[in-house]
Amino acid sequence: MTRPASRVAWGLADQGLSSLTNFALASLVARSVNPTQFGAFSIALTIYFIAAGASRSLNVEPLLVRYSAKSAPSHRVAPGPTGSATALGLAAGVGVAVAGALMPDDRYTFWALAGCLPGVLLQDTWRYCFVAARRPHLALMNDIIWALPMALLFWLIVVHHRSTSALLLSTWGICGTAAGMVAAVGERTLPSPRSGYRWLISQRDLALRYLGEFTAANGSMQISVFVIALVAGLPAAGAFRGGLLLLAPVVVLYQGARLVLVPEVVRTATHDTHRALSSLVQLGLMLIAIAAVWGMLIGLMPTTLGTKLLGSTWDGAQPLIPPLTAMIALSGLETAAVIGLRSLAAARHSLRARIFEGTITLLAVFASAPTGDVLVIAWGLAIGYLLETTVWWHHLINALQQYGKRPYAAS
């Protein structure tokens, strides 16, 4: 059994490698195909992120919350979440395949995604089964099993000038599926549709609320970008996205911290909620500091380097770095509160906070949109994040006061 600090380190390394494989895929496709193909690929990758987010809400987060405090749950529990994730991948794959058939251009990209969705969702779920079982080193090893052959095949594809979005996406997906099957065979635990159904029924009190959170958070941000494009123009929306892209490493860190630290806080909160709260405050302050330092480095970056990273978009993105950094920093403090509510299985509290968050985000955008200035909109969102973070911590403190040292079984 590894120590908590080691488990966190292994988990963050795994999250970093997982994000790197996705980044490598997107970067290589962007460099290898024409704008039309990249547009189709971007839509396909967005669909994958939505499917992965939905799968984590329904399967991964209930697993981390409910089973992290127990010893080695993967053998006993894994058939449920992995079966549910695979079934979700199959259902989503059918929808993507039908959508691809209706696409006038580059339908093969969508068909490639449809074929690999069940496998990559299976692999993603196995990663967190290992984390919940206090064996995050196996999650990292499994991602290495995905990354190494993918890197070799990508190199061969580029060398032979065969790069297409469909071929690259298929390669990524096949390697991910193979890694998922290696995990299943190695644990002698195959995904079971029947167990998946029972899993969703047994975890519906948490899973449906977590899915609602995911929908509210992603929907409000997508609408925000659309509003920016509508009132300030596509270049402004591109600058906004470009600025967020430069801050993406911090966001990846937050995502990794959230999924890796939830099991650790679950174990702490089981015995001492006051100690858990103190740890969360320290975590939130640390994440704010990391975001502030990273944002400062980006803001002071030479124009030549910024242009190399974002091209002509850099000129519009650079003025947005201060408000976007404020947003991301406050999001770090919010992440600590989210981890706390997850550790208590306080799904009702977190859903209310997430709905409030989505509402404030939209109000901030629509209130500042009449100016037609993306910088004003960005500062409006930053102010909205301050309100949202306050509400998250309000819900966390209320949850702790209401339940004391007794962690939630459901809420």
Image (cartoon, rainbow, N blue to C red):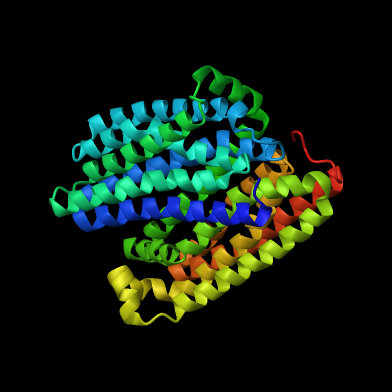
Quadrant of res 280: bottom right
Q: Quadrant of the C terminus?
A: top right
| 237 to the left or right of 28 | right
Quadrant of res 227: bottom left
Quadrant of res 172: top left
Q: Quadrant of the N terminus?
A: top right
Q: Residue at x 73, y 62 (%)?
A: 281
Q: Residue at x 64, y 64 (%)?
A: 386
Q: Residue at x 51, y 72 (%)?
A: 294
Rendered location of residue 92, percent (x, y)? 40, 30
Rendered location of residue 315, percent (x, y)? 34, 75
Rendered location of residue 35, percent (x, y)? 21, 54
| 346 to the left or right of 355 | right
Residue nearer the viewer, 216 or 45: 45
Q: Is residue 326 visible?
A: yes
| 246 to the left or right of 207 | left
Residue nearer the viewer, 220 or 312: 312
Q: Is residue 209 visible?
A: no
Residue nearer the viewer, 226 or 67: 67
Q: Residue at x 40, y 38 (%)?
A: 179
Rendered location of residue 199, percent (x, y)? 60, 24
Q: State how many labels appear.
A: 0
Name the residue at the top extreme: 194
In the rendered view, tell whether residue 186 sits above or below residue 327: above
Residue nearer the viewer, 390 or 115: 115
